[in-house]
Amino acid sequence: MATTKKGGSSAGTKGGGATKAATKTGTKGGAKAADSDKTTRVYAATMSSLKALELTCEKDEADLSAKILSLQLATNNGDDVTAGIYQDSDDDNLGELAFEEYKTAVDEQSIKAIHQTQGDTFLFKGEAYVKNKPIKLLAFREG
């Protein structure tokens, strides 16, 4: 089972490679997602680049017919991994993701402003492993 670095469980399973596993789970409350199912995909910490993670998540959205909700640092059987949480969706507006690394609050605000002017929709702040190093990222859906 994959466990998030900040505590709690992200309902992952074991496996190998860039996309390690997918597990369906019932949602644990929340007004927006009370009747929806969520899926966790587990990505190896050795992901080659942020762009590779972005493309992998786009493919997973298409394969799962689900929107990405978050990316977070986790462990799976003692190994560092990135956990991607997806929620089932009937929306055709999947894919076309843009992930941007940031380091400071100023970076974060600048990146958000740039994407807003391009008509992109901000999705979430997250964290992921790229080349075995944790990074902070912003996720957008391109307009």
Image (cartoon, grey):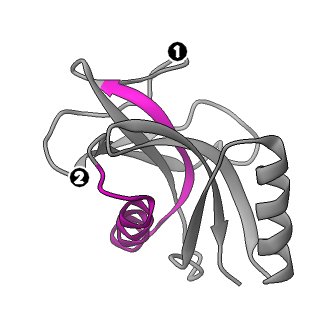
Disc sitting over residue 61 in the figure = none
Q: Residues within 10 Å of mark 1 (few under 14, many from 20)?
A: few
Q: Secondary structure at mark 1?
A: loop
The kind of residue tagged 2 is: Ala
Q: Which residues are magenta?
A: 47-75
Disc sitting over residue 18 in the figure = 2
Query: Which is more N-terminal, label 2 or label 1?
Result: 1
Residue under label 1, please give it: 7
Q: Is residue 143 visible?
A: yes
Q: Secondary structure at mark 2?
A: loop
Residue 91 drawn in magenta: no
Relative height, residue 22 to residue 27 (above, below): below
Outermost residue on the left side: it is 16
Q: Quadrant of the N terminus?
A: top left
Number of marks present in the image shown: 2
Relative height, residue 11 to residue 23 (above, below): above
Relative height, residue 50 to residue 134 (above, below): below
Q: Residues within 10 Å of mark 2 (few under 14, many from 20)?
A: some
What residue is rendered at 39% in x and 40% in y?
82
Residue 3 falls left or right of residue 105 = left
Q: Calculate the distance from the C-alpha at mark 1 to the C-alpha at mark 2.
A: 23 Å
Residue 31 falls left or right of residue 133 = right
The kind of residue tagged 1 is: Gly
Kindly indicate the quadrant of the structure image that contains residue 75.
top left
Q: Is residue 1 visible?
A: no
Residue 78 falls left or right of residue 53 = left
Nearer to us of marks 1 and 2 is 2
Does the residue at mark 1 contact the one at mark 2 (Cβ under 8 Å)? no
What residue is rendered at 58% in x and 30% in y?
28
| Residue situated in front as seen by the camera: 130 or 2 | 130
Q: Quadrant of the C terminus?
A: bottom right
Relative height, residue 46 to residue 5 (above, below): below
